[in-house]
Image (cartoon, helix red, strand yellow):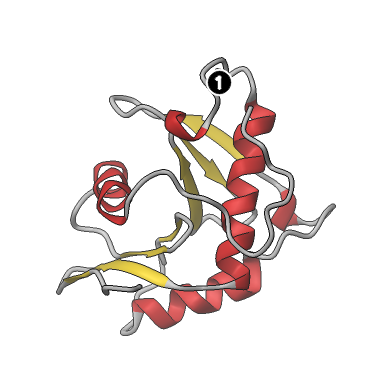
Amino acid sequence: MPNLQNKDQESARILSTDELADTYRKILGSSNCWVLFKNGTCIQPREKTEDVSSKAHELLAKYGPIQTETPASDFNIMSLTGIEGWIVTCGHPDIVNYISPRELGPNTTFGDGHTIELLSRLHRDSDTKNPIIIHVEDEEMIYTPRIK
């Protein structure tokens, strides 16, 4: 099981921006609009919008914070077909997190949904507190800002 203690502002992602973007592209398809944040939270606004990045920031600010006993604390873990790992949903259908098996300890399996859920919440909480967009895809463009 990964060590989830002493994680302050940011979670430690094992996957690179390119790996995360490629994985989300496989999951969501290349014709969909979506925004990827630094710690792996992906927002796929279902409502048409001219500025998908602003909409993603708005949704993350409103629905991203972890609040116990609210819809924001609800989750569902979904296994993926043809892709190793899991998608974890939250209380808003436009917000998901991908968890790679590489983020888990060598003896962790899907049966340990608690660890997968905690990692997902950690990543989403980190992105809520420090919302840095690392990749945007929409019908018109693909944009990966270069951040330090």
Callout 1 secondary element: loop
Amino acid type of the residue tagged 1 in the rendering: Phe
Picture quarter with the N terminus: top right
Q: Nearer the viewer, residue 117 or 48?
A: 117
Give the vertical position of 67 relative to 83 (above or below): below
Which quadrant of the view contains residue 137? bottom left
Give the total number of marks visible in the rendering: 1
Residue at 64% from the left image edge and 38% from the top image edge: 117
Q: Quadrant of the C terminus?
A: bottom left
Instruction: Report x, y in % for residue 81.
Output: 33, 25
Name the residue beneath numbered marker 1.
110
Judge whether 34 appears above or below 68 on screen: below
Residue 98 on image: x %, y %? 45, 43
Looking at this view, is 81 or 13 the one in front?
13
Where residue 53 sits, quadrant-wise, is bottom left
Residue 110 relative to residue 84: left or right: right
Residue lying at 73% horizontally and 55% vertically, measured from the top left: 71
Which residue is pictured at 35% across the width and 76% down the height? 52
Q: Is residue 135 left or right of residue 132?
A: left
Q: Nearer the viewer, residue 110 or 59?
A: 110
In this picture, residue 142 sits left or right of residue 65: left
Q: Position of residue 6 (x, y in %)?
A: 73, 51
The residue located at (45%, 28%) in the rendering is 101
Which residue reaches farthest right?
69
Rendered location of residue 112, percent (x, y):
64, 22
Q: Residues within 10 Å of mark 1 (few under 14, many from 20)?
A: some
**Residue 109 occupies quadrant:** top right
